[in-house]
């Protein structure tokens, strides 16, 4: 299997608010960057979407080392919480719904395709790839072509934007 490094970050201006994700994929000496912004979303959704979009960009099953500054994602996968949430009908416990189940479902499908390792890196701590992803994510928020995070606005209809 080919070995790929996937660096990801999500950002939000307000939470919820306009958000974006940034991705850097590295295979040997090749690099690819991806970024996109959304009108109204959350930081956790952008962190998740960064990992999803990075994995979706890989055309064949690979060994992927993922680097994220999101403890939410890294711990949910490494501690296997996300698998428990899914088995419990997307409930964190008897009273609390697991958030972002639409994105977790997408991620779990991708995790079946690739052999992945999740690594947590401290954000804003000088890791060049993480800093680059943060830059891509925050620049994506400034784009005039922000997308609608339809699943988020479906869950929170009172927070839809008018523009």
Image: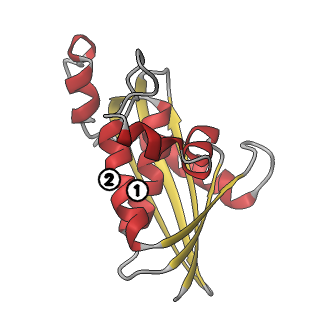
Position of residue 15 relative to residue 44, above or below, is above
Residue ID at (58%, 38%): 72
Where residue 119 sits, quadrant-wise, is bottom right
Q: Percent position (x, y) of residue 110?
A: 37, 63
Of marks 2 and 1, which one's residue comes earlier in the chain? Answer: 1
Residue ID at (50%, 52%): 22
Q: Secondary structure at mark 2?
A: helix
Q: Which residue is mark 2?
A: 106
Residue ID at (73%, 51%): 121
Quadrant that contains the C terminus: top left
Label 2 to label 1: alpha-carbon separation: 7 Å
Position of residue 44 relative to residue 2, above or below, is above
How many residues crowd around disc 1 within 10 Å: few (fewer than 14), some, or many (20 or more)? Answer: many
Q: Is residue 12 left or right of residue 94?
A: right
Question: In the image as oriented, which residue stretches furthest toward the right?
Answer: 125
Position of residue 51 relative to residue 151, above or below, is below
Instruction: Report whether residue 61 is seen.
Output: yes
Position of residue 99 relative to residue 110, above or below, is above
Q: Percent position (x, y) of residue 63?
A: 54, 78
Where residue 37 sits, quadrant-wise, is top left
Q: Percent position (x, y) of residue 2?
A: 53, 87
Q: Nearer the viewer, mark 2 or mark 1?
A: 2
Residue ID at (67%, 60%): 129
Q: Is residue 27 left or right of residue 36?
A: right
How many residues crowd around disc 2 within 10 Å: few (fewer than 14), some, or many (20 or more)? Answer: some
Q: How is the image coloured?
A: secondary structure
Q: Secondary structure at mark 1?
A: helix
Asked whether disc 2 touches disc 1, contact meaning CB atoms under 8 Å apart, the reply is yes
Q: Which residue is mark 1?
A: 52
Near-viewer residue (61 or 159): 61
Instruction: Report whether residue 139 is seen.
Output: no
């Amino acid at each position: 299997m080919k070995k790929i490094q996937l660096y990801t970050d999500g950002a939000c201006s307000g939470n919820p608010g306009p958000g974006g994700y940034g991705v850097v994929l590295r295979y040997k000496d090749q690099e690819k960057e991806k970024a996109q912004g959304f009108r109204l979303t959350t930081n956790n959704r952008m962190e998740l979407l960064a990992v999803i979009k990075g994995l979706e960009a890989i055309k064949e099953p690979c060994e992927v080392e993922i680097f994220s500054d999101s403890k939410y994602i890294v711990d949910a996968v490494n501690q296997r919480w996300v698998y428990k949430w899914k088995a419990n009908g997307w409930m964190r416990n008897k009273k609390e719904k697991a958030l972002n189940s639409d994105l977790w479902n997408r991620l779990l499908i991708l995790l079946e395709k690739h052999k992945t390792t999740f690594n947590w890196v401290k954000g804003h701590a000088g890791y060049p790839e993480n800093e680059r992803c943060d830059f891509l994510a925050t620049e994506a928020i400034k784009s005039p072509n922000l997308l609608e995070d339809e699943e988020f606005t479906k869950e929170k209809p009172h927070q839809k934007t008018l523009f």
